[in-house]
Image (cartoon, grey):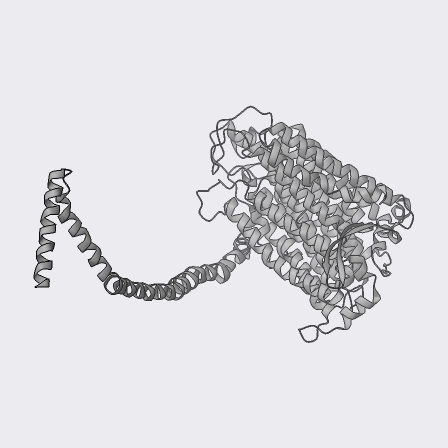
Amino acid sequence: MDFFSLLAWLIPVPPLLSFFIIILFTNQDRRLSHLVALGAIGLSLLFSWTVVFRALGTHHFAEHPIAVSVAWLPTGDSVFRMGVAVDPLTVVMLFFVPLACFLIILYSVGYSNYGKPLDQRDLPGSPPHHGVEPMYSRFFAFLSLFAGAMLLLTVADNLLLLFFGWEIMGLCSYLLIGFWYGRNYDDSNQITPRQAAVKAFITTRFADVIMLIGIVYLYSEAGTLNFREIFFSADIMNHLLHTPSLIGGLAAAHLIGLLIFVGTVGKSAQFPLHVWLPDAMEGPTPVSAMIHAAAMVSAGVYMIVRMFPLLSAGGGVHGGSPTMTVMAFIGGFTALFAATIALAQNDVKRVLAYSTISQLGYMVAALGIGAYVAAAFHLMTHAFFKALLFMGSGSIIHGVEHGMHHTNEKLDPQDMLNMGGLAKRMPTTYWTFVVGGLSLAGFPFVTAGFWSKDEILADAFAHGHWWVFVVLLISAFLTAFYTMRQISLTFLGDARTESAAKAHESAWTMTLPLVVLSFFAVLAGYVGVHMDFPVLGDMLGNNPFEHFVVGTLPHHLDGFEFNWTPVLFSVLVGIGGLGLGWLIYGRRPLSAGQPDPLVARLGPIHKLLVGKYFLDEFYNFALVRPAKWVSEVVSFLWIDRVIIDGVLHTIARFTMRIGAGARWFDKWGINYAPDKLSDGIRASGYSFRVIQTGRVQDYLLITLTAVIAVSGVLFLMLR
């Protein structure tokens, strides 16, 4: 094992060890706990970037990736091997995942008020904690475990090890979404953190079980779960493609692909399993950033990018397989569906949550039409600007909460209608948030989000996927609009509450990550500019991102010629959405008490969007309530109380009667005569003990009397 192979093994180890160190040893020392977490993820970042720059400096790295494995489990005639592998796709993930995790953990120090004077007042809905973040050390332990699981998933060379990291992240999401489990709200309709944690866990577990079935099915057909052994073996791929599945008309490859894709639908919050992600905002903001940018939902898209050769089997790279058709439909629909809901949300984090669902839909749709490179590119850029936006929103909330501590207001610190005027009070947060927002909106030719989103649109246009192109264009327009709405409501105009007027800039541990991420939210896009783009294409190296990442695939991937039409449409919808948002919200910012202009303009449609199309209510009516009824009535009352308890109680009564009969027989049939004999002996003993006086004269008298009596009896008998 060479030096770089050893580093590849070590990448996920420090944060995983950090979790155990904090939980077992440093949990009583707040400062030492966050230093351990920072040091651990810093080591992983160092190891990762060392491997990344070695890979970037190696010619034809895709032909000689880093791969090392060990024997793990005997399986019949073979041995299942576990190991790590670093290929071009892994390099992309190792570039941004540990960096984002490091910045999020650093940000968490300031977010958790470390080193700040205690404030005796607590936020509405929270249990008393006197200004100190409760379970501070535990929070950093969970973040470390989350980061370690994502890194383990990233470097895994097989689907089973990937699934291990996948499930650890599912546990971490439950622990961190419900981290503030003591919170309760006056509004009974508002979900609490502990309810949101259960909702996320159950929803994603449902998808993961189906995914696990697909993994087992794949192993039963292929005999291996190693990515390269499957994708680079013509025999295995042909076998999977030409073996019929249990569902008529589908080959084994197609059914396996669909089963595995369900895991992404759950993990990456695609319709119809998207409902857990907006409620996950009940967790602390660093958790939201970790889930939406560095791990969890990114893992879902990464998994299908990794499995793309299998998902596209039998249909050509640019669509045609049943799996890719389903992916294109779900991704495109989710992108538009979530973007419409984001229009009417007032919670600063929920807007970003639905934005994440929409952007993930972009990536899934891109893979569905064969835009492999564009999907991987957007996955990277999205991680940077979405982490920036979530941490920016946390800084905003932090500022408003500080204002609440200096006023007597009782309000929701996450409601954008309670903000306004924060640009003057929080300039660093404002400018970095604007950079992230413009990148999300696809501000043309400058931001990373424009270049990655434009690649998806250009690929859809070039290969004739017209409906995907149109749906994603509309989604891009809505994205730009609600982004400008969010910026305007939050930062522009005058403060609409006293708390917003008292807000101030966050600590450097929160603003420094924002500055770093804003740098990448702009410059990260230039590595993927189309090679034929005028001037910039040649200047930036003829799309080095595509040339590097495409080597991950076992087959050649056809590109497409540059065309100004999708670029112009992309520019039009980006500028148009931002402009319309500015006209409605930015030109004349809302004043205190002024209603949202969209309420009047959209009418009943606005209620539909605020209610998120009432899918949660539908699921509650169609799934949750029936499930509760089944558990409470069928399972508990009928099956448990009537059937199971009834049978057990009947058996118990029968055996009690048998026992009672046996007891009667034992008492009167077996024990009666011995008991009476013993009673007689005892009675005679009581009767004769009076003669035991201890006087010799009495004993001689008794003896003489007995001799006389016996002699008399013998005399009579002899006569």
Asked if residue 537 shows in the view, the reply is yes
Residue 661 versus residue 266: which sits nearer the camera?
661
Residue 109 image point, x, y percent: 63, 31
Residue 635 image point, x, y percent: 43, 62
Q: Residue at x 87, y 44 (%)?
A: 56
* Viewport quadrant of the N terminus: top right
Asked if residue 518 shows in the view, the reply is no
Relative to 466, is 564 on the left or the right? Answer: right
Q: Quadrant of residue 269?
A: bottom right
Residue 285 versus residue 155: which sits nearer the camera?
155
* Viewport quadrant of the C terminus: bottom left
Q: Given the current orientation, which residue lies at the most extreme bottom position?
A: 248
How many marks overall? 0
Residue 486 versus residue 689: which sits nearer the camera?
689
Q: Given the current orientation, which residue lies at the most extreme front position?
A: 719
Residue 175 image point, x, y percent: 57, 44
Vertical side of 695 occupied by 444: above or below: below
Relative to 264, is 369 on the left or the right? Answer: right
Relative to 400, is 699 on the left or the right? Answer: left
Q: Residue at x 70, y 56 (%)?
A: 160
Residue 630 image point, x, y percent: 45, 63
Residue 661 versus residue 591: which sits nearer the camera?
661
